[in-house]
Image: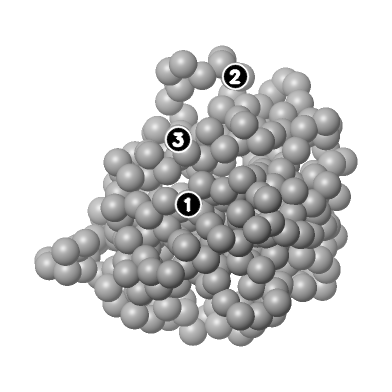
């Protein structure tokens, strides 16, 4: 889980030696991620340049602000993206563009819409350097399972009204860090529509509460991918076994893998971003969507 200990550790290399990345490093990585997102995809079906727009719509307790990126022309299966604790920013927009070029209509949500419009932070370094954990703490408290599920239903309803969304196909959802549980709760909130859910270094997926994601897999009709960071696995080595047992008991297909990278490795502006392991996780995500949607 992304907490103060994780933030401190992220200032070090993956081996705990040497300095963290500078803001210049983050900027360079963001530029690389954007370039990759905009480059032609070898082997992928040719797509036109995706349409990208800021959107707002009614959601519980306010107006959701989000970024909607989709191929043009035509219809595409929808993907809901729940960002990590620092909220939506360029790193997630780059992900959305890449997914759109793969043939998906992508909605990147602002989980903190009840309190502040996005972007809340310029990048993850801005979050770390400027008291991000303290700023988001009261916003996070509102993101209970019930609140997230209510929001997810509104999001699905909005997506199904868009002409660029193929409603004949299921919806996918992916969540990062604190967004990991949100992806599972989204699948439980709209089981008739959400057919695939992926979590990347997801926080608090296993617990004793009835709303713990591990206990809600049976309320879904989704196939799952649980991509676990190695440091999270060291902290809670039983989680992968619990998730596997829960998926089996619920009869839900689930891929569960511990990656050789640390918490945050899939997000391009993270100090622990790992290109090779992120690329492997990305391929696993695309396989999930191709099979389930």
Q: Nearer the viewer, mark 1 or mark 3?
A: 1
Q: Along the polypeptide, which appears first: circle 2 or circle 1?
A: 2
Task: Note whether 184 is above or below 206 in the view shown.
Answer: above
Viewer-proximal residue among 216 and 178: 216
Which residue is disc 2 drawn over?
Answer: 47
Classed neighbour count for the residue bearing mark 3: other residues with Cα under 10 Å, few (<14), some (14–19), many (≥20)? few
* Residue 265 left/right relative to 25: right
Label 1, label 3: how many angstroms apart (C-alpha)? 14 Å
Which residue is disc 3 drawn over?
Answer: 283
Q: Nearer the viewer, mark 2 or mark 1?
A: 1
Which residue is disc 1 drawn over?
Answer: 256
* Residue 40 left/right relative to 190: left
Q: Position of residue 180 (x, y in %)?
A: 56, 61
Q: Quadrant of the N terminus?
A: bottom left
Residue 92, visible in the rendered structure: no
Residue at the far left in the pictured view: 18
């Amino acid at each position: 889980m992304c907490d103060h200990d994780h933030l401190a550790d992220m200032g070090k290399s993956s081996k705990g030696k040497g300095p963290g990345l500078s803001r210049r490093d983050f900027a360079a990585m963001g530029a690389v991620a954007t370039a990759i997102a905009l480059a032609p995809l070898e082997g992928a079906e040719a797509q036109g340049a995706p349409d990208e727009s800021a959107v707002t719509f009614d959601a519980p307790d306010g107006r959701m602000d989000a970024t909607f990126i989709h191929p043009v022309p035509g219809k595409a299966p929808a993907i809901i993206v729940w960002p990590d604790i620092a909220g939506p920013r360029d790193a997630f927009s780059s992900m959305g563009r890449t997914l759109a070029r793969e043939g998906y209509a992508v909605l990147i949500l602002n989980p903190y819409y009840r309190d502040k419009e996005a972007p809340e932070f310029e990048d993850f370094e801005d979050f770390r350097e400027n008291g991000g954990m303290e700023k988001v703490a009261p916003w996070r408290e509102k993101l209970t399972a019930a609140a997230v599920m209510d929001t997810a239903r509104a999001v699905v309803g909005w997506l199904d009204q868009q002409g660029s969304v193929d409603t004949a196909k299921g919806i996918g959802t992916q969540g990062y860090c604190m967004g990991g549980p949100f992806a599972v709760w989204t699948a439980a909130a709209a089981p008739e529509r959400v057919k695939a859910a992926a979590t990347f270094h997801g926080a608090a997926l296993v617990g004793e509460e009835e709303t713990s994601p591990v206990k809600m897999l049976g309320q879904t009709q989704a196939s799952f991918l649980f991509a676990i960071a190695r440091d999270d696995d060291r902290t809670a080595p039983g989680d992968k076994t619990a998730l596997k047992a829960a998926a089996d008991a619920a009869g839900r297909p689930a891929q569960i893998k511990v990656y050789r990278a640390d918490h945050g490795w899939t997000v391009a502006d993270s100090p622990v971003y790992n290109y090779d392991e992120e690329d492997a996780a990305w391929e696993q995500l695309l396989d999930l969507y191709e099979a389930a949607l």
